Image (cartoon, rainbow, N blue to C red):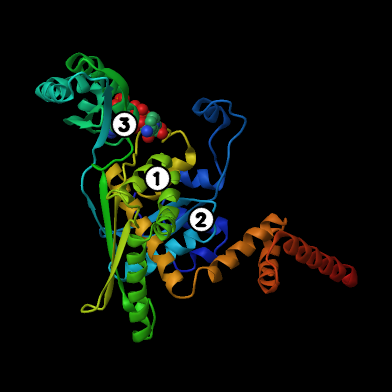
Amino acid sequence: MTKKVMNWTGFSKKSLQERINLLAEKQLLSSENVDNLKHNRQLPLETANQMAENVVGTHSLPFALAPDFLIDGKDYQVPFVTEEPSVVAAASFAAKIIKRSGGFTTVIHDRLMIGQAVLYQVPNLKKSQKDIMTQKAQLLMLADKAYPSIVKRGGGARDLTAEIKEDFLIVYLTVDTQEAMGANMVNTMMEALMPLLEELSGGQQLMAILSNYATESLVTASCQVDLRFLSRDKAKAQTFAHKIELASKLAKTDSYRASTHNKGIFNGIDAVVMATGNDWRAIEAGGHAYAAKDGQYRGLSAWAFDQKQQILKGSLTLPMPVATKGGSIGLNPSVRTAHDLLGNPNARELAAVIASVGLAQNFAALKALTSTGIQAGHMKLQAKSLALLAGAKEKEVPTLVSQLLKAKHLNLETAQSILQNLRDQESGTKIGKS
Ligand code: NDP
């Protein structure tokens, strides 16, 4: 199916039905997935009941679209699953500016998973380490034999090392898991190695499991931003660029700021990881461990103002072992829709998209923080959430939001009271007319 090029201006102003119709009209989704959206098809209860224990229902979140990401020369409409207001708007805003500045470029450094088999009470750690390494070929073969289907798919065990850490002897195995995240694959392989590792070391097995610190699955996304998008006033634009550079430096220096800086990055990353049915705990764990790789927790991205070229340059590197096969991917209709919206990318391409989204989200947050502050935009969206919470109908929301923003205290009580007034006025008008 050839997807048509389109202009996304005004997408946010359209009604929900109009947005879905547009996706269909521009052939950005298969008819089955358009249908899934039209009928809001969710995870079937019977499937949910097989996925987790003690199931009593399913849980929904907004499924949104951040359009117009230009990544490695290709356009992507990115699905976001998030409950947080302003995340999609911020990402879309950043994507638009970055596209006009040339788009994102990415590098997939590698796509291997790491497993660890840990031994304790090893009588002679150094000798055992040596003995294990002598048997490396045999151990790699054993690992492959434990999961032959991944070998058939072109993956399998790639390397093995043994390290002594305090009283532990830890055997690390790197595995090419192809399109899968690989947790179950790697766990199976690690457990299969244990009997021989115990025999070779004379030690006891403590555990055998995948590591979420996926340092062999690093992705870098980079972009640049033309200064004219920071402000029309050249001097102001330079000040903003300089302040974004400083904000990135601050996140590399102060862990309190780094945590919030990275949270902003994960606002985008988690939303796409969830939409595509991936394990967001695994991605968070890997990302945060990588942020502390040199012993101090630091911001994951870096921004620099290139004075000579008059551009702002950003980059983000982190582990991104996402999958397009396995786990619960394929069970949930909206996950299938998400993959389709992205053009059914492979695992490497999906990782590149997600890292770019993280960088876009970070740019939007830093731009807001170092210029207007984030509260202005947030309060509008917060008012919208309060209006919905107060029970406002779709057509009542805009008036309620505008009145709420003028109120002294932005809370649920105020929203309820304004809504009541609006409804009283409306019924008064109707009675007056009749
Ligand atoms: P699966 O156990 O689902 O294995 C991947 C599946 O995808 C296999 O059945 C494989 O088939 C199939 N597949 C089809 N095509 C491909 C392809 N091209 N490349 C690779 N596999 C393909 O998933 P994972 O091993 O990836 O484990 C992920 C799950 O494990 C997630 O649900 C995660 O939440 C969970 N988990 C995470 C842990 C952690 O992060 N620490 C720990 C434990 C579990 P075949 O078998 O025929 O090769």
Ligand 1 is in which quadrant of the figure?
Answer: top left
- The residue lying toward the viewer, choosing from 292 and 302, is 292
Query: Seen in the image, is 95 located left or right of residue 169?
Result: right
Of callouts 3 and 2, the N-terminal one: 2
Query: Seen in the image, is 376 located left or right of residue 162?
Result: right
Amino acid type at mark 3: Leu
- The residue lying toward the viewer, choosing from 188 and 167, is 167
- The residue lying toward the viewer, choosing from 378 and 36, is 378
Q: Quadrant of the C terminus?
A: bottom right
**Can you tell which mark lies on residue 216?**
none
Quadrant of res 376 = bottom right
Amino acid type at mark 1: Glu
The alpha-carbon separation of the residues under discs 3 and 2 comes to: 43 Å
Residue at the spot of label 1: 284
Residue at the spot of label 3: 210
Q: Is label 3's Cβ within 8 Å of ligand 1? A: yes
